[in-house]
């Protein structure tokens, strides 16, 4: 009997649909998920397209994601335009998007642990195996899974510096009040 790896397709669809419906959740979801966390390859491709759009500060919606997938030659592998559109129908509640992302992340971690367990078991059966080396490999494998789960992605300073500089320049030019307006012009 073959067991199905841990996954939750409904949660995957809900995450993608939530992003398509309300792109403001994208940054928080990117802190939780990576494209390879999705069980279905087409969902990983769609999420990758969303990440690319986000990194280019482009809007994320059905049209832009479909266009990005078409431009990268992945639209057929992603299920086609109709599938991308259908994802907006599978969102129970957008405000629960982070919970759906956590479910997808947990299932991905379980799959990684299953793979690691199999790798450790196979290595344990090797007749020429060194027990200390095997223990080290097992510890490293589990540690890497744990670190991957807790790590946040990093950006190069050259990618974010122009945006930060622009924000600081706008604040220094005094176009907007940078805090709570008091009504006293000199103080504001």
Image (cartoon, helix red, strand yellow):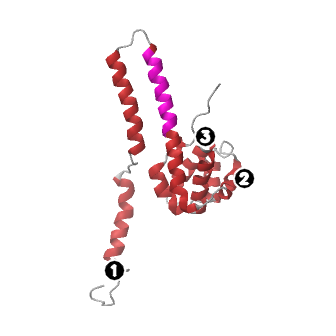
Q: Is residue 127 above or below residue 188?
A: above
Q: Is residue 173 above or below residue 56?
A: below
Q: Is residue 74 above or below residue 169?
A: above
Q: Residue furthest right?
A: 82
* Residue 181 is inside the magenta segment: no
Q: Look at 69% across and 56% down and name the residue there.
A: 85
Q: In which quarter of the view is residue 4 placed? A: top right
Q: Residue furthest top?
A: 127
Q: Nearer the viewer, residue 6 or 186?
A: 6
The kind of secondary structure element at disc 3 is: helix
Q: Please state the horizontal and vertical placement of residue 116, each as a whole percent of the image.
A: 46, 28
Mark 1 neighbour density, 10 Å: few (under 14) some (14–19) many (20 or more)? few
* Residue 120 is inside the magenta segment: yes
Q: Nearer the viewer, residue 118 or 34?
A: 118
The kind of secondary structure element at disc 2 is: helix
Q: Please state the horizontal and vertical placement of residue 185, each as a whole percent of the image.
A: 31, 89
Residue 115 in the figure: left or right of residue 168 = right
Q: Residue furthest left?
A: 186
Q: Which residue is mark 3?
A: 41
Could one spot residue 55 in this view of the protein? no
What stretch of residues is rendered in magenta?
109-124
Report the quarter where the N terminus lies.
top right
Q: Which mark is residue 63?
A: none
The answer for how far apart the CA atoms under marks 3 and 1 are is 48 Å
Q: Look at 64% across and 58% down and name the residue there.
A: 62
Report the quarter where the C terminus lies.
bottom left
Q: Please state the horizontal and vertical placement of residue 8, each as a whole percent of the image.
A: 60, 44
Q: Which mark is residue 174?
A: 1
The kind of secondary structure element at disc 1 is: loop
Q: Which mark is residue 82?
A: 2
Residue 162 in the figure: left or right of residue 81 = left
């Amino acid at each position: 009997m073959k067991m199905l790896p841990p996954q939750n397709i409904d949660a995957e669809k809900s995450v993608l649909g939530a992003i398509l419906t309300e792109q403001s959740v994208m940054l928080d979801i990117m802190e939780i998920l990576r494209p390879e966390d999705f069980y279905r390859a087409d969902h990983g491709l769609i999420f990758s397209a969303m990440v690319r759009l986000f990194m280019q500060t482009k809007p994320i919606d059905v049209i832009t994601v479909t266009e990005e997938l078409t431009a990268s030659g992945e639209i057929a592998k992603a299920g086609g335009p109709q599938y991308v559109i259908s994802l907006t129908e599978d969102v129970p509640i957008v405000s629960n998007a982070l919970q759906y992302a956590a479910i997808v992340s947990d299932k991905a971690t379980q799959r990684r642990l299953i793979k690691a367990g199999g790798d450790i078991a196979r290595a344990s059966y090797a007749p020429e195996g060194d027990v200390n080396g095997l223990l080290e490999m097992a510890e490293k494998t589990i540690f890497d899974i744990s670190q991957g789960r807790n790590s946040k992605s990093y950006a190069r300073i050259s990618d974010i510096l122009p945006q930060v500089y622009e924000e600081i320049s706008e604040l220094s030019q005094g176009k907007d009040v940078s805090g709570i307006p008091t009504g006293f012009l000199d103080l504001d």
